[in-house]
Image (tube, rainbow, N blue to C red):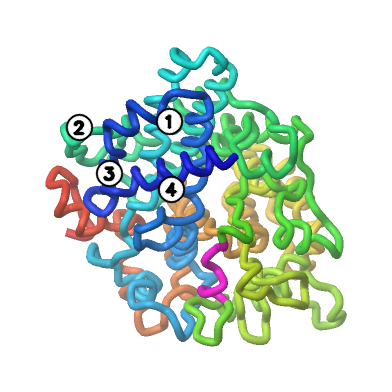
Amino acid sequence: MKRNIYRVSLLILLFSISSCKKWLTLKPQDGIIRNEFWKTKEDVQAAVIGCYSSLLGAPIGIKDRALVDYLFIWGELRADMVSPGLGITIDEQNIMNVNILSSNSLTSWKSLYRTINYCNTVIDFAPDVKKVDNTFTQVSLDAYLAEALALRSLMYFYVVRTWGDAPLKLKSTSTDQEIQNLGTTDKATILNQIIADLLKAESLAVTTYGNKQYDTGRITKYTIETMLADVYLWMEKYNECIEMCNKVIDSKKFSLVSGAQMYHNVFYQGNSTEGIFEFQFDAQKLNPFYAMFLPTNRRLNAAPNVMETIYTQDFVNDLNVDRRGLDAAVRPKDNMIYKYMGVDYNTTRTSDISYAHWFAYRYPDVLLMKAEACSQVGRGQEALDLVKVVRDRAGALVATERKPDITDKDGIADYILEERAREFSFEGKRWYDILRNAKRGNYRRIDVILNMVAAAVPSDLQQSAIVKYQDKNSHYLPIFDDEINTDKTLKQNPFYK
């Protein structure tokens, strides 16, 4: 164990030496990595652990936000469920006000490409280890490659949904001579690469590591199938999405958590029966959410409308509540984002136990992705039945129930979008959900974004935001100035030129 920890630390340190220079060409020092590291199956294991470690925070010596800090910002700040706190930064405020410039540090993709390069290094070097370590089996190699391919795909899925066209880097950079300017690749090509890699990973991945923590904290076959469903849904390949969702459902490995212990089991303890892939923060590696959400000068709050319009209230019976809302997602008395801050429905965490997981995928996501796909292929009743399953286990209030006609694709999709807001509040999904619905059918539903502006943007800036959002290029972030200055072949998003 100590040897593996040392090797992980060495690998991450070597990867990070040049990381402040050029994020797309992160490189370990060639001689050490090639000649000293990649010798045994333990080296491969340590390198894969390094890929997962990069999800939890920047390497030692690198001044940067944690990846999940960015994931929250990219997935929530342009949507309608978060409001500024007293400690909000100027860059965060500008994103919320739809005043986004390429000089905004939050448009940097370096944290994603850092992990991408770690994964590329495993994919490039791990097969050679099998040639020199006779104890390293093909089954083990395949499993590690599946993890690296899937993690790389997840990072690229964030890239393509956040920036659209972006660099596609599939080989690691291990020498100064290999540094190259990549330019941008169109988003359709990136998505096709993601699908190809995930299908390959699906064929190589394990179904279990033997315990729930590992199965939720590492990539399994079911994680990959869930990711495939998500990408297919984004690409409007609905039958393929349904097929992948069915694989996860039919495995019977996952189930919804209901009852009074729902919050504690899912969000405090983590790795519940709902968990498909969770970033495993712990006492040794705390998450960044305490500083974001808890102090009086916290950066971000839940928007005031969240409890009123998304979860609503039963004015006849105060005890009748949606278990996902009151003191679960939000603490109403001060609009604290509570999902990551609570021990239970009544007690907040202290800073030393701020290790709530980041929930990349939970089982309700599979059910609601299938519902959304079904709504678009003439299976409206099936879609509504799936929504009901998710709602019933949470005690959703009658006031939030909708009864669209089973032939009304848009009505059912809107209902599912509302339900996803309740189910995945503050899990970094809201903006992507809105954008996915808006762009459906060549932006036939642009109204989904435009209607959101009233709840998301200050009143004096709403008209400006509406004008901007009518240009579909504005739905993606600009490439950060530092990247443009480093790689002259990058093409800036036309909206920000």
Image: 66 above or below 177: below
Q: CA distance from mark 3 to mark 2?
A: 12 Å
Disc 1 marks which amino acid? Val
Q: CA distance from mark 2 to mark 1?
A: 17 Å
Q: Farthest front residue?
A: 2
Q: Which mark is residue 122?
A: 1
**Mark in the foreground, 2 or 4:** 2
Disc 4 marks which amino acid? Tyr
Say whether disc 3 or disc 2 marks the residue closer to the N-terminus: 3
Say whether disc 4 or disc 3 marks the residue closer to the N-terminus: 3
Q: What residue is pinned by disc 3? A: 24
Callout 4: few (<14), some (14-19), or many (20+) C-alpha neighbours within 10 Å? Answer: some
Q: What residue is pinned by disc 4? A: 158
Q: CA distance from mark 2 to mark 4?
A: 26 Å
Secondary structure at numbered mark 3? helix
> Residue 114 vs residue 226: left or right?
left
Q: Would you identify the image quadrant in which residue 129 lies?
A: top left
Q: CA distance from mark 1 to mark 4?
A: 20 Å
Say whether disc 1 or disc 4 marks the residue closer to the N-terminus: 1
Q: What residue is pinned by disc 2? A: 178
Q: Residue at x 76, y 63 (%)?
A: 263
